[in-house]
Image (cartoon, coloured by chain):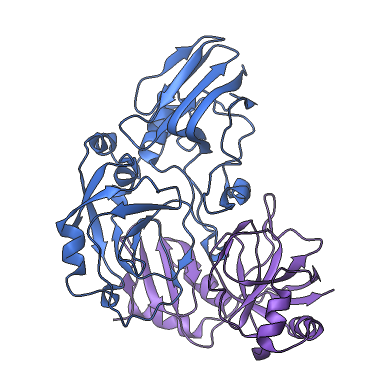
Amino acid sequence: MTSSFHVERVLGLATFQDRGHRGLMHAAVPPGGALVPELLVAANRAVDNPDDAPCIEVQGRLSIISTAEIAYAIDEQPARSWRDGTAIDVASGSRRCAYLAVRGGFVGVQASFLAAGPRFRGALLCAGDEPLRTGAAFPSANLPPVRRDVLPTADIPPLSAAREADRDSDVIRVVPGPDLDAFAGDALDILTGATFRISPASNRVGTRLDGPLVPRRADDRERSRPMVIGALEVPRDGKPIVLGPEHPTTGGYPLIAVVASADLGRFHAIRLGGSVRFAVS
Amino acid sequence: MAYVALGDRAIRVARPAGVSPRAIVHLAKSWPGVVDVVVAREDVAVYFADRPVIDDAQIAALASATDDGTPVREHLLRVTYDGADLDDVARATKLSVADVIAKHQAATYVVDTMGFAPGFAYLDGLDPALELPRRSTPRERVPAGSVAIAGRQTAVYPFDSPGGWHLLGRVADVTMFSTHAGPLLALGDRVRFTT
């Protein structure tokens, strides 16, 4: 059974996301995908979808109407039934983003790299084909249900880890380097000794951190280097940027550390304006 | 030390001299557990699905990596030379606009690295007479398809994006990154420009 959806209102940014893609970074295509894969997977499992079925990632609020009855889930909440004509509200609330999954998935949504093109437009990069606009309509629901016991689950961290991000301040583990020689001797101590604030000027390309400056050596020679999701790159101004799913694959700033892969979703779940601390793993 | 950790899912090594970028990608992608490879000017990063498992012999082998033998693709891109910086480039290089265009078209370029934006290829081989530093103030928006130069390189912007290179023109009839076929240019490809 298919139904269609009508976007009543978007406040902030709502985009289709899946778990991203691999194997194309040599062509400068970053992994993309959900900021918090743990929540996307939880929402999909609640409605018996494949783990990587596209969901709507909401940074802010989304109000959406379905034309037919359908099951849906938000983040790690249990599945609920959606009656025709009723509106459902999705709000990121105490986290940076929330995920809406519908049983069967969203039809016609190409969240693969082949849809990645337009999302790299401009400085304010948006994901999916295009951000969802108020008034947009799209069909849904024809993926076959997936039996949960056949899902590969090994690489999904426990959801409790993502729930932790409800707290305002959280310790995120980092792997130091690889460019420590580009920084002043006390830079790593500064990074791990202070509380940083997640700047509202953050997006899916990078998360900006407000806090004490992380000092660079004046004589460091910048060069274009390979980047990775979770890398803490530091421009000359000393304000670190943590690279997100749509990061450029190369960049000129040195890396003081990289967020541990197990903590990446938890880091990206911290709301804008929330605080974070870093510790060497 | 042959390599450094780039987080807990990737490593970075110095790029071996004189080895083609696609040979590096080809070899590193054949290693167990490897999902991605990025070749930058001076570094190579290798990305793993899980914790990197790697030894010094593998790293050393990169220096003698050989190409997979697939023919190098050649592209002839038609350009409309009406870029916003064409006059400025002519002034700064003390050349006529016609000479700037002629020199840009005379060279055969090679894709040495890719980065910045999906499908953005850094093309080596720009005539030294056209070498200029990047614009002091980058543009907030450079239109997709713009043909630009900076340093000793030229490139075509695949998407509307910010950019600090000097705009010479735009490609006439080609899509640099198609949502169906992906990027037009690949590491090692040869590119020439024509009118």
Residue B187 seen in the figure: no
Q: Residue B169: x and y, percent?
A: 75, 69
The residue shown at (54%, 11%) is A69
Q: Based on the displayed image, in which of its 4 quarters is residue B118 positioned?
A: bottom right
Residue B131 to residue A37: above or below: below
Q: Residue A207: x and y, percent?
A: 37, 51
Q: Residue A253: x and y, percent?
A: 39, 69
Q: Based on the displayed image, in which of its 4 quarters is residue A107 positioned?
A: top right
* Front residue (pair A265, B56): A265
Q: Residue B96: x and y, percent?
A: 78, 86
Residue A202 seen in the figure: yes
Note the chain letter of the blue one. Answer: A
Looking at the rendered structure, the number of numbered marks drawn on it comes to: 0
If the image is split into quadrants, where does the C terminus of chain A sit? Answer: bottom left
Residue B71 to residue A37: above or below: below
* Front residue (pair B31, B143): B143
Q: Colour of chain B?
A: purple
